[in-house]
Amino acid sequence: MKALLLAGGMGTRLRPLTEGLPKPMALVGNRPWLEHVLLHLKQEGIRDFVMAVHHSQDVIRHYFGDGSRWGVSIQYAVEQTRLGTAGAIKNAEPLLGDRFLVLNADIILRSPIVPLLDYHEQSGALVTIGLTEVDHPSHYGVVEQDERGRIIRFVEKPSLHEAPSRRINAGLYVMEKKALASIPAQQEVSIERETFPQLIESHGGVFGFLLGGYWLDMGTTDRYRKLHRDLLDRKIALTLKEKERGQGIWVGEHTDVGSGVLFVPPVLIGDRVRIGDRSVIGPYTVIGDDCEIGAQVRCSESILWDRCKVHREAQLNHCIFGSGLELGAGHLLHEAVMNVLPGGVAQ
Ligand code: GDD
Ligand code: MG
């Protein structure tokens, strides 16, 4: 079975981190989120992937290529204009089989896939939507089900009092190719606002299956921070390339730690990082590959992407830095989310 990964969104709510970068390429624990998604689905037995991307998303193709580095096969369905979630699936139709998985590429999910596929098979559904339960459903697609699990209402981002339940679309679907029949080709169509409500209205066989395990949509900086906290607390078992060298201290390869450096766990330090003498790193801190941290730097509750430079005696607390950001000596930053524009100017 193939999995179609919807990766063509704009990531507006994660800006400035995703400025010039597709949201699923945001680094999570020192590797692009999309790579974690791929590794998880591979563990679940999926080997064939299609990535639905916008033509401006060369960075995804460049990074993943044909997938052979991960022992999987990847094809690309490229959109010339923005087609929305259903339009993107329709655009990928020629690359898909009679039954396939669709996944929003920005969700963090650790649930087994087989029970969802079994449920889909047994219910004879045209579409099975993976569901999860959240406290604030109005940020999501909210469903109402009958006692057999059939979805009788799907409301995308309802206001609080309109939400029919706390059960939401987790962004994972099993679909039959037939479900795409009514979607017009090469037009912008939303699966959440148009296709699902239409299929439900015409009694088209849309079912919902409650997924277990960890689930999070990482689409805002608050949730992105929460994801890293959960990762460092090992509430979510993502595969890290770094090795745990002490309790809650993960360090990559060829990393050079100066004398008197104190790691306050949990911390995750990437490959080829240099940390100057007497710096204090952590807790809840991620330092990306090839970062250079000067002497006597204090860095806590912060996430630095790769190639950042923090000069001596700077202090960071609760910050997120995009790739290649540089912070001058002695600077003090609290709660900053910063990135470098493609032209090289800090934002
Ligand atoms: N290829 C392609 N083309 N992908 C797209 C497009 C498009 O035009 N528009 C959005 N996507 C991708 C995004 O990259 C993301 O992976 C996914 O589709 C969902 O888009 P978001 O923009 O992240 O939507 P959302 O988070 O507000 O809501 C969606 O996800 C929730 C779960 O996290 C909806 O599906 C909700 O119903 C759902 O509850
Ligand atoms: Mg999202």
Image (tube, helix red, strand yellow):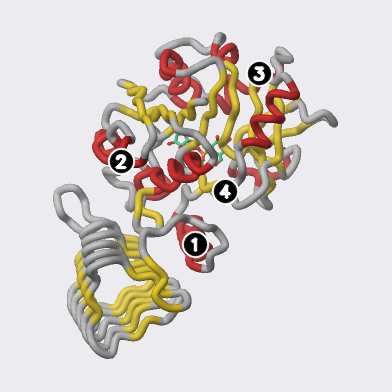
Residue 338 in sight in this render: yes
Q: Which residue is mark 4?
A: 110
Label 3 near label 2: C-beta < 8 Å? no
On screen, residue 99 above or below 236: above
- Label placed on residue 126: 3
Amino acid type for the residue under numbered disc 2: Arg
Which of the two discs, 4 and 2, labels the residue nearer the N terminus? 2
Q: Mark 1: few, some, or many residues within 10 Å (few <14, many ≥20)?
A: many
Q: Is disc 4 in contact with disc 1, using a CB cutoff of under 8 Å? A: no
Q: Residues within 10 Å of mark 4 (few under 14, many from 20)?
A: some
Q: Is the residue at mark 4 in contact range of ligand 1, meaning its CB lies under 8 Å from it?
A: no
Give the CA separation, mark 2 to mark 1: 24 Å
* Residues at marks 3 and 4, CA–CA distance in whole angstroms: 24 Å
Residue nearest the viewer, comparing 222 with 127 = 127
| Residue type indicated by callout 3 | Leu
Q: Amino acid at mark 1?
A: Leu
Foreground label between 4 and 2: 2
* Residue farthest along the right direction in this orientation: 147
Outermost residue, left direction? 343
Q: Report, in whole angstroms, how far the alpha carbon at label 1 lies from the one at label 3.
A: 35 Å
**Mark 1 highlights which residue?**
231
- Tell me the crowding category of disc 3: few under 14, some 14 to 19, or many 20 or more residues within 10 angstroms, Cα based: many
Q: CA distance from mark 2 to mark 3?
A: 34 Å
Q: Residue 156, relative to residue 320: is it above or below?
A: above
**Residue 237: image location, x then y, percent:** 52, 58
Q: Earlier in the sequence, mark 4 or mark 1?
A: 4
The residues tagged by marks 4 and 2 sit, at their Cα atoms, a distance apart of 22 Å
